[in-house]
Image (tube, grey):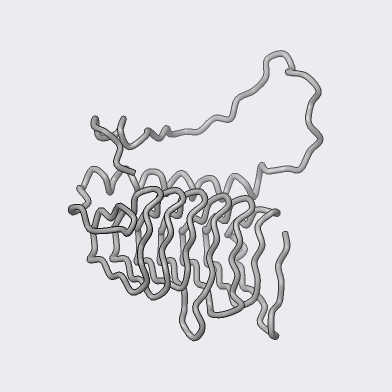
Amino acid sequence: MPIYQFADVIPVIHPSAFVHPSAEIIGDVIIEANVYIGPNAVLRGDFGRLIVCHGANVQDNCVMHGFPGKETVLEQNVHVGHGAIIHGCHIDENCLIGMNAVVMDLARIGKESIIGANSFVKTNAHFEPRSMIMGSPARFIREVTADELLWKERGTSMYHKLSARCHRELKLVEPLTEVEANRPEVSWSESHSTKREALHGESEC
């Protein structure tokens, strides 16, 4: 995986964390235990320190970049969906950042909040814990329900397991040229449903 020192500062990655070989980790980046960093994610700590706390995940094609003189933080069990941009902000524990959402400089997202997909959180925006946040610019919609939080936590738990499985089972190979007989499937000991399926309503994220 491309890991780069910048200005005499070397990234720190806990041995239990999984960082995909195509991800790029640059400069002042601290990745704690049981973190998952997905394919093509870029964590660029050349302006300010980036901290990814225990159990968080940063999925495929995400960008995390700092603001000069400030720490950019994903607290414990933060879940960052595919393609999101985290820029110079602080995300409190157990939040979900939806796919392709953008969270800008000096924003603060209270714990157990959910930011909907494609939302844009403006510079200096602050949201209380358990906020459902949506729109461009993003605004408070309502409080996150207990069922929504449980759905979020189940998804994050899957990424905890994925991190461990990738250490054991992810291998670089040449592709097969045809489908083999009795082709195996990837199996999991637990299932995860969409938000709509889990809550018996329309998905908001």
Quadrant in the picture for residue 90:
bottom left
- Who is closer to the viewer here, 150 or 102? 102
Give residue 180's position: percent from left, percent from top.
Answer: 74, 17
Residue at horizontal 45 percent and vertical 54 percent from the top: 80
Residue at horizontal 29 percent and vertical 45 percent from the top: 150
Residue at horizontal 49 percent and vertical 50 percent from the top: 160
Give residue 69's position: percent from left, percent from top.
Answer: 49, 86
- Who is closer to the viewer here, 139 or 192? 139
In the current view of this chain or complex, which residue is farthest to the front? 136
Quadrant in the picture for residue 137:
bottom left
Residue at horizontal 24 percent and vertical 32 percent from the top: 201
Judge whether 147 appears above or below 35 on screen. Answer: above
In the current view of this chain or complex, which residue is farthest to the top? 181
Q: Quadrant of the N terminus?
A: bottom right
Query: In the shown orientation, is residue 52 left or right of residue 114?
Result: right
Judge whether 102 appears above or below 161 on screen. Answer: below
Q: Quadrant of the C terminus?
A: top left
Judge whether 114 appears above or below 191 on screen. Answer: below
Query: In the shown orientation, is residue 61 left or right of residue 200?
Result: right
Give residue 110's position: percent from left, percent from top.
Answer: 28, 66
Number of marks present in the image shown? 0
Give residue 167's position: percent from left, percent from top.
Answer: 64, 50
Query: In the shown orientation, is residue 189 left or right of residue 7?
Result: left
